[in-house]
Image (cartoon, rainbow, N blue to C red):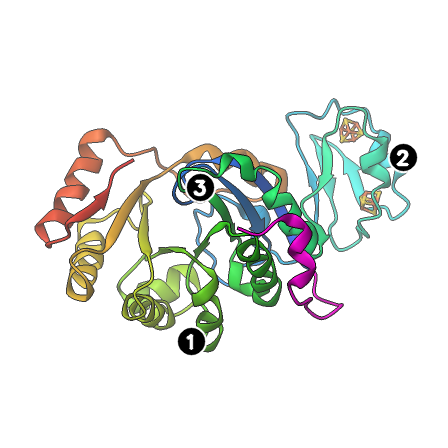
């Protein structure tokens, strides 16, 4: 393992190489092995209706308002010189008028306004991730997530290079919606690939998520062929992916590629509804988390299709 002072040995990316991030999660336990620091990158080409991180969908930075914190004092309205804010039942944001100048954020007495991202260099991002490296013993490390990591792949690559140069374990959480060429560049820098397969049916994938699944499945096969450590996750979303037919099709595909494939079914978590309220978007999933019995029934489908390496929450 090299010391932090050796980081200058890592070649710098182009001066314009910067990334837009929206969250750093410390002591994460679900983003790869051990305790991890996870950095979330903005921008995603998929449009999953149930997205748990809607602030990661857009690659750009936007103003956020949290109605639950707001005391409706109107100071933000007075501070805004662009006429981008109005106050009625709540503060409404005209995003086409907002210049993200930050005056309203400074004026708010209760912190109900913020920007949903910031721009950092690869070195700054690596420093943020490595701050807690003392806790990365026993297999922990750093994870890049999103959004979709590959939307900002030159930045992500530079961050991973810096972490690898420090001898730190690395992971990415991704849809794997990227080209073979780009994926190839990540292979030597990533210890664990965590990817979603949400639908097997190509038409359903296109209609619900907005993109084809061919590239995703081809990249999964590439990772397996390269001997990479891969965990495939399927989120079980009521009214969408949580059907016997879909889970059976995914399990059948995975078993045909590799019966020892690591696979995990993720239960639906409706906690993200407040984020949609902040964006003044409707959350389209009208369901609840699956019961233990329902989860067990889906796990039995994986077993019946021959999968032997099932991760249970
Ligand atoms: S960030 Fe600036 S332009 Fe946007 S709403 Fe706030 S004060 Fe107005
Ligand atoms: S300044 Fe803050 S608390 Fe007051 S209305 Fe605006 S967002 Fe709400």
| Apparent side of residue 291 relative to residue 161 in the rendered image (left or right) | left
Q: Nearer the viewer, residue 289 or 196?
A: 196
For mark 1, what is the residue? Answer: 180
For mark 3, what is the residue? Answer: 140
As drawn, which residue projects farthest toward the bottom? 181
Q: Tell me how many marks there are.
A: 3
For mark 2, what is the residue? Answer: 78
Residue 43 lies, with reference to residue 83, above or below; the image says below
Q: Nearer the viewer, residue 243 or 149?
A: 149
Q: Is residue 2 magenta?
A: yes
Decide whether the magenta segment is chiefly helix, strand or loop: loop
Residue 170 lies, with reference to residue 206, above or below; the image says above
Residue 171: percent from the left, percent from the top?
A: 45, 52
Precedes in sequence: disc 1 or disc 2: 2
Q: Residues within 10 Å of mark 3 (few under 14, many from 20)?
A: many
Asked if the beta carbon under badge 1 is closer than 8 A to the nearest atom of ligand 1, the reply is no
As drawn, which residue projects farthest toward the top? 71
Q: In the rendered structure, which segment of residues is drawn in magenta?
A: 1-18
Residue 235: percent from the left, percent from the top?
A: 34, 47
As helix, strand or loop, the secondary structure at mark 1 comes to: helix
As helix, strand or loop, the secondary structure at mark 3 comes to: loop
């Amino acid at each position: 393992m090299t010391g932090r002072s050796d980081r200058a040995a890592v070649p710098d990316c182009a001066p314009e190489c910067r990334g837009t991030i929206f969250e750093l999660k410390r002591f994460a336990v679900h983003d790869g092995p051990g305790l991890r620091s996870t950095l979330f990158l903005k921008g995603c080409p998929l449009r999953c209706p149930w997205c748990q991180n809607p602030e990661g969908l857009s690659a750009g930075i936007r103003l956020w308002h949290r109605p639950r914190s707001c005391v409706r004092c109107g100071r933000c309205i007075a501070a805004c010189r662009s006429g981008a804010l109005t106050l009625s039942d709540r503060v409404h944001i005209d995003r086409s008028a907002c210049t993200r100048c930050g005056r309203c954020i400074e004026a708010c007495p209760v912190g109900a306004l913020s920007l949903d991202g910031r721009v950092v260099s690869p070195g700054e991002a690596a420093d943020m991730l490595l701050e807690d490296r003392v806790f990365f013993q026993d297999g922990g490390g750093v994870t890049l997530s999103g959004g979709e990591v590959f939307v900002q792949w030159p930045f992500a690559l530079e961050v991973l290079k810096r972490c690898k140069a420090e001898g730190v374990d690395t992971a990415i959480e991704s849809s794997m919606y990227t080209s073979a060429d780009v994926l190839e560049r990540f292979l030597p820098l990533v210890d664990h690939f965590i990817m979603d397969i949400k639908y097997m049916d190509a038409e359903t994938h296109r209609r619900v998520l907005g993109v084809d699944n061919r590239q995703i499945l081809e990249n999964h096969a590439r990772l397996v062929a390269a001997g990479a450590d891969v965990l495939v996750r399927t989120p079980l979303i009521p009214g969408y992916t949580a059907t016997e037919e879909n889970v059976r099709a995914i399990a059948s595909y995975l078993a045909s590629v590799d019966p020892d494939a690591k696979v995990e079914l993720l239960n639906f978590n409706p906690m993200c509804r407040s984020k949609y309220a902040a964006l003044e978007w409707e959350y389209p999933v009208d369901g609840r988390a699956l019961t233990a019995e329902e989860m067990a029934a889906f796990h039995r489908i994986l077993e019946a299709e021959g999968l032997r390496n099932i991760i249970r929450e």
